[in-house]
């Protein structure tokens, strides 16, 4: 099975469509969405409707912190992100908000566990940014004995960790388009990057593709019309920083 792993779309319809087209061209047979479908971007309703349709066809979906904020935004606006959460909430229909609220925090299928942040208390939205936090997440995945791969997003970066012979987790910085052997006799954790809001100085969208038969994982970067996505944010009257982030990839 070829499993496409997409996270942190952030209401960026142009990036989502580009990554889906790329994944299908790579032969993806199963889609997984790792949370934060909304937030920051200008087309939350279109993104949700598209992913709901894909879920009806069999896609796996988990909830992220921005999805939760869109359902129940802060009572008072303290920072720019709070305004975005309220704006997103107002754009969504009751049915769309109900769908977001009903999504699980984790989803396990055979050897794969999906989570937005960390499998260690997933509702606390801990960032997995180093070997220590990756270890906590991977250790929590022992609750699912068959799981060998833990996939998350949240940090908007692409990183792979594996458990070495001495039991310590080792980080590996992947190169886009390079297939990495991930044999099932080891335990692996990956953050798959952000489809809709990369923050590494490169505006190209991110996602990853796991081939469970060949036991290889490939991280991808995908060109999309980030100028159009930024323009949509400006037309919606959202904060300028939400648009300029897409143009700069930061």
Image (cartoon, rainbow, N blue to C red):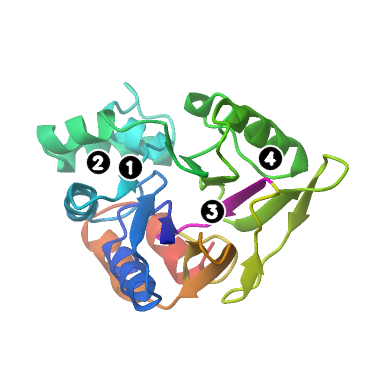
Query: Residue at point 35% right, 58% down?
Result: 30
Q: CA distance from mark 3 to mark 2?
A: 22 Å
Q: CA distance from mark 2 to mark 1?
A: 5 Å
118 w.r.t. 223: above or below: above
User: In the depicted view, which residue is nearer to us: 53 or 43?
Assistant: 53
The residue beneath circle 1 is 84
Most extreme residue toward the top is: 75
Q: CA distance from mark 1 to mark 4?
A: 29 Å
Q: Residues within 10 Å of mark 1 (few under 14, many from 20)?
A: many
Q: Which of pointers 4 and 3 lies earlier in the amino acid sequence?
A: 4
Instruction: Tell me: 109 left or right of 111.
Output: left
Return the x and y of residue 188 as percentages of the image width and height: 65, 48
141 w.r.t. 166: above or below: above
Q: CA distance from mark 4 to mark 3?
A: 15 Å
**Helix or strand or loop: what does disc 2 sit on?**
helix
Q: Which of pointers 3 and 1 lies earlier in the amino acid sequence?
A: 1
- Which quarter shows the N terminus? bottom left
Q: CA distance from mark 3 to mark 1?
A: 18 Å
Question: Mark 3 against mark 2, which lies toward the viewer?
Answer: 3
Q: Are marks 2 and 1 in contact (CB under 8 Å)?
A: yes
Q: Which of pointers 4 and 2 lies earlier in the amino acid sequence?
A: 2
The residue beneath circle 2 is 87
Give the magenta-colored segment's residue range. Answer: 187-196
Q: CA distance from mark 4 to mark 2?
A: 33 Å
Q: Which of pointers 3 and 2 lies earlier in the amino acid sequence?
A: 2
């Amino acid at each position: 099975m070829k499993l496409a792993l997409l996270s942190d779309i952030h209401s960026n319809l142009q990036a989502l469509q580009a990554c889906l087209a790329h994944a299908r061209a790579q032969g993806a047979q199963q889609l997984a969405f790792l949370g934060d479908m909304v937030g920051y971007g200008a087309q939350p309703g279109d993104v949700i409707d598209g992913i709901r349709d894909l879920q009806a066809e069999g896609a796996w979906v988990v909830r992220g912190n921005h999805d939760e904020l869109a359902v129940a935004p802060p009572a008072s606006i303290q920072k720019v992100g709070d305004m975005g959460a309220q704006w997103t909430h107002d754009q969504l229909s009751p049915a769309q908000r109900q769908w977001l609220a009903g999504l699980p925090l984790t989803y396990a299928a055979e050897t794969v566990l999906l989570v937005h942040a960390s499998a260690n208390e997933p509702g606390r939205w801990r960032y997995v940014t180093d070997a220590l936090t990756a270890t906590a997440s991977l250790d929590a995945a022992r609750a699912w004995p068959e799981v060998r791969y833990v996939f998350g997003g949240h940090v908007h970066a692409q990183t792979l960790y594996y458990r070495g012979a001495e039991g310590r987790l080792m980080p590996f910085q992947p190169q886009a388009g390079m297939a990495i052997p991930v044999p099932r006799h080891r335990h692996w954790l990956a953050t798959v990057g952000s489809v809709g809001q990369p923050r590494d100085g490169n505006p190209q969208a991110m996602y990853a593709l796991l081939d469970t038969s060949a036991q290889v994982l490939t991280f991808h970067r995908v060109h999309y019309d980030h100028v159009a996505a930024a323009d949509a944010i400006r037309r919606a009257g959202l904060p300028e920083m939400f648009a300029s982030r897409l143009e700069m990839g930061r």
